[in-house]
Image: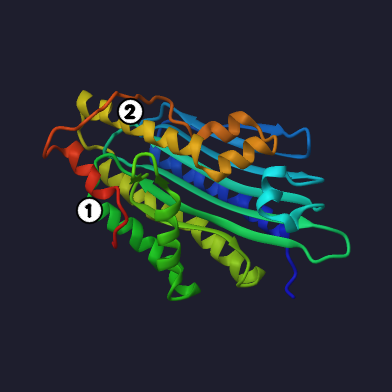
């Protein structure tokens, strides 16, 4: 059995947070991340980094957390009874970027590692993560680029990996009460341990680093696209869907809150501004109406 090196995982995650923050600051050219370190009373802590009111990004958060405890939350052991009686550690980097320009998509990425240990028994561990794209005014070429990067980084790990994790993303980032996907998807995986530690860790690293390759070219291409009040209002309306998903369905949000995580860091994914409108319907054949064509799973 391969050794499980949780210290190497933590070192990579801290470096990943630094790499992503530096790249996003360079892309924005104006704003800088402010770091807020925190400790969790039950064990662990993290460092949250938030960028606000930039030239390109209205708000972005890149959070590292490493929390641990003597026992799992009851909500977790109900679904995974084999975790009962084990001490646990959960660590990860999670980010959400809300650009100013409505023609730049919102983006999310997350990579994480979980391990539950008990003296005299083998550890239970797994990796999870992924990234997804949420455009308001989608461009076909941007969506194809995003998925091509995802497909390319999956290729060394098996022919079936992209198709499986792409489909998993489509299923996961779905709002049943709206009958639409949150965006155009990407990759999502969880409970990954069947490849062994080294290969699973390598894949998690590829996904974490691949986010910048997927996202920054889209930002550069759309950052100077002109927009007005109509596009801004639609952006804020569609941000409401993001809030709905994160508060109702997102497993990371629910685990963080139920395990006593830091609320401000958990909810950093929320947009700085959003709006809801009763029974909103876009004008027929408008750019806004076109978005609905992208909110269903499709091959890219």
Q: Which residue is mark 2?
A: 236
Q: Is residue 163 above or below residue 74?
A: below
Residue at horizontal 38%, vertical 39%? 177
- From the image, which quarter does the N terminus lie in? bottom right
Q: Pointers 1 and 2 in contact (CB under 8 A)?
A: no
Q: Which mark is first along the chain, 2 or 1?
A: 1
Point out which mark residue 230 bears. none
Q: Secondary structure at mark 1?
A: helix
Q: Is residue 258 visible?
A: yes
- From the image, which quarter does the C terminus lie in? bottom left
Q: Secondary structure at mark 2?
A: helix
Q: Position of residue 93 (x, y in %)?
A: 58, 47
Q: Is residue 8 left or right of residue 296?
A: right
Q: Which residue is mark 1?
A: 140
Residue at horizontal 18%, vertical 39%? 289
Q: How is the image coloured?
A: rainbow
Mark 2 is surrounded, within 10 Å at the Cα level, by few (under 14), some (14 to 19) or many (20 or more) other residues, namely some
> Cα distance, mark 1 to mark 2?
22 Å
Q: Is residue 198 left or right of residue 151?
A: right
Q: Is residue 241 left or right of residue 139?
A: right
Q: Residue furthest left?
A: 285
Q: Position of residue 68 (x, y in %)?
A: 75, 45
């Amino acid at each position: 059995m391969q050794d499980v090196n949780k210290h190497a995982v933590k070192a990579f995650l801290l470096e990943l947070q630094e790499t992503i923050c530096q790249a996003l600051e360079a892309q924005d050219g104006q704003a800088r991340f402010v770091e807020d370190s925190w400790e969790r009373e039950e064990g662990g802590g993290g460092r949250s980094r938030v960028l606000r009111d930039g030239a390109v990004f209205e708000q972005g958060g890149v959070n590292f957390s490493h929390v641990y405890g003597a026992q799992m939350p009851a909500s977790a052991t109900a679904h995974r009874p084999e975790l009962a009686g084990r001490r646990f550690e959960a660590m990860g980097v999670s980010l959400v970027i809300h650009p100013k320009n409505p023609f730049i998509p919102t983006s999310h990425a997350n990579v994480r590692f979980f391990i539950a240990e008990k003296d005299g028994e083998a550890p239970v561990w797994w990796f999870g993560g992924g990234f997804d794209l949420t455009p308001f005014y989608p461009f076909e070429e941007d969506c194809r680029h995003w998925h091509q990067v995802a497909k390319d980084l999956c290729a060394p790990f098996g022919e079936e990996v992209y198709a499986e994790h792409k489909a998993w993303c489509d299923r996961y980032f779905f709002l049943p009460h709206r009958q639409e996907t949150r965006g155009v998807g990407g990759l999502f995986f969880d409970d990954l341990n069947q490849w062994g530690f080294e290969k699973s860790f390598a894949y998690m690293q590829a996904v974490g680093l691949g986010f910048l390759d997927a996202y920054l070219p889209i930002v550069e291409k759309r950052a100077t696209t002109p927009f007005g009040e109509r596009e801004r209002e639609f952006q804020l309306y569609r941000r409401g869907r993001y809030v709905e998903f994160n508060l109702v369905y997102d497993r990371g949000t629910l685990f963080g809150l139920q395990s006593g995580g830091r609320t401000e860091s958990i909810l950093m994914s929320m947009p700085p501004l959003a709006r809801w409108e009763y029974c909103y319907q876009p004008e027929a054949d408008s750019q806004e109406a076109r978005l609905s064509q992208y909110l269903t799973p499709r091959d890219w």
